[in-house]
Image (cartoon, grey):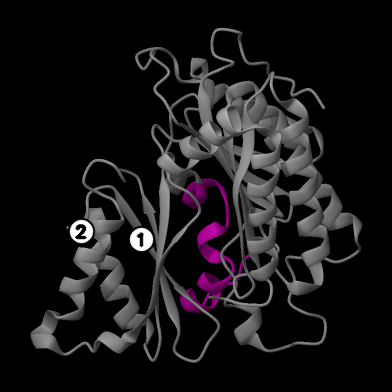
Amino acid sequence: MIPPTSIPKALSKNLLACNIYVSAGHPSLSSHLLSLLLQSQKQCLSLLPHNRVAIVHAFTDVTYRRSSFHVAGDAEGVTTVSSRLASDAMTSLVGVGVDPLLPDENNNDVVTRNTRHPFVGIVDHVSVMPLERDGNDESEETTTAHGLAARAIGEVLSQRGCHVHYYGRACEDNTPLATVRRDKTSFFKSGGLETERGTSSPYDYGAATVGAPDSFVENFNVRLRGSDRRTAASLARALRYRDGGVVGVEALTLPYGGGGRYEVACNLLCPETGGGMDEVLSRLEAWKTGDGGSREDAIVEKAYRVGTTRKQCMDVLKLSRDGGGEVREEYDAGVLRRFEYGFVSDE
């Protein structure tokens, strides 16, 4: 598959990362998702040494019914691998005769149905980020390597029948992801947010948000137990930048599997300039001892990074360059093993 938007030769070796988020994570679909990962790993190896590209990480969350694949490499390789992975995910999950956006056939429990992660489509979100600066930050947004790569991936999905909403450097006005989700999709009225807001909206199974933020974005979640939405929302406000929290942090409160479990899902837009994991954990500690020390430490079940860091991506690409095929195959086996384990454990 050749993406319809090509990457100019001058930008083709710029290093990028691409995160692909799929609205499927139920164990019944594990074989399909594992096959997608394995095929993509083989494709990455087949492109060596002309293209340096790797699947750095893969993650699934059974409760959220959501999986993600994290690709890194040169712009040409990332575009080639990510286009195929996203397209194959969309078509293969529909092709198995199971709609991954619906609850289990034998489970009518609204807790299961309404605590999944918000979504707008099977391939819900594709984010292409720079690992190095393009060196042309003052130029038009679609001339950056990550902007062009995002457009190319989006065009492949569009050709397959997916309705694509672009954001960041992949669209004309560099619109933020949150704005596109709010104004053009039902994301904030879907999944767990539908029940929490008491609203109902038709699910758009064929949409995806595809874009290119200005810098590398990290994801970090804090899971609470024995809690309620009000308490979880207070943590989100403590972390969220626009509410006086950590610089560059976007935070969303989501129910997590019922039983008083909630997560505060965070996008870290400035992870290397004062808005990283350490700063979030520091603010979390301050929140736990706030209100006169009334919040017990035990309320925090888990605080964890989802996905990759820029350094991790660069280290894996260096491994690909210096270690040879056998080292890469060993690394890939570990990624596959951890992804498989995710279908039987939420740890």
200 in magenta:
yes
Percent coordinates x, y for residue 211 in the rendering: 54, 36
Percent coordinates x, y for residue 22 in the rendering: 67, 55
Dominant SS in magenta: helix
Is label 1 in a helix, a strand or a loop? strand
Q: Residues within 10 Å of mark 1 (few under 14, many from 20)?
A: many
Residue plotted at (72% across, 34% down) = 44
Nearer to us in this view, 5 or 11: 11
Q: What kind of residue is marked 2?
A: Gly
Locate residue 29: give its quadrant: bottom right
Nearer to us in this view, 312 or 243: 312
Most extreme residue toward the left is 292
Any part of residue 83 in sight: no
The residue that mark 2 highlights is: 245
Dot 2 and dot 1 residues touching (CB under 8 Å): yes
The residue that mark 1 highlights is: 251
Q: What kind of residue is marked 1?
A: Ala
Q: In this view, does 128 lie to the left or right of 275?
A: right
In space, the residues marked 2 and 1 are separated at their CA atoms by 10 Å
298 in magenta:
no
Q: In which quarter of the image is the N terminus?
A: top right
Residue plotted at (49% across, 47% down) = 183
Is label 2 in a helix, a strand or a loop? loop
Does residue 99 lie above or below 313 as drawn?
A: below
Percent coordinates x, y for residue 289 in the rendering: 14, 81
Residue plotted at (56% across, 29% down) = 322
Mark found first going from the N terminus, 2 or 1: 2
Q: Give the range drawn in magenta.
A: 181-201
Percent coordinates x, y for residue 280 in the rendering: 26, 60
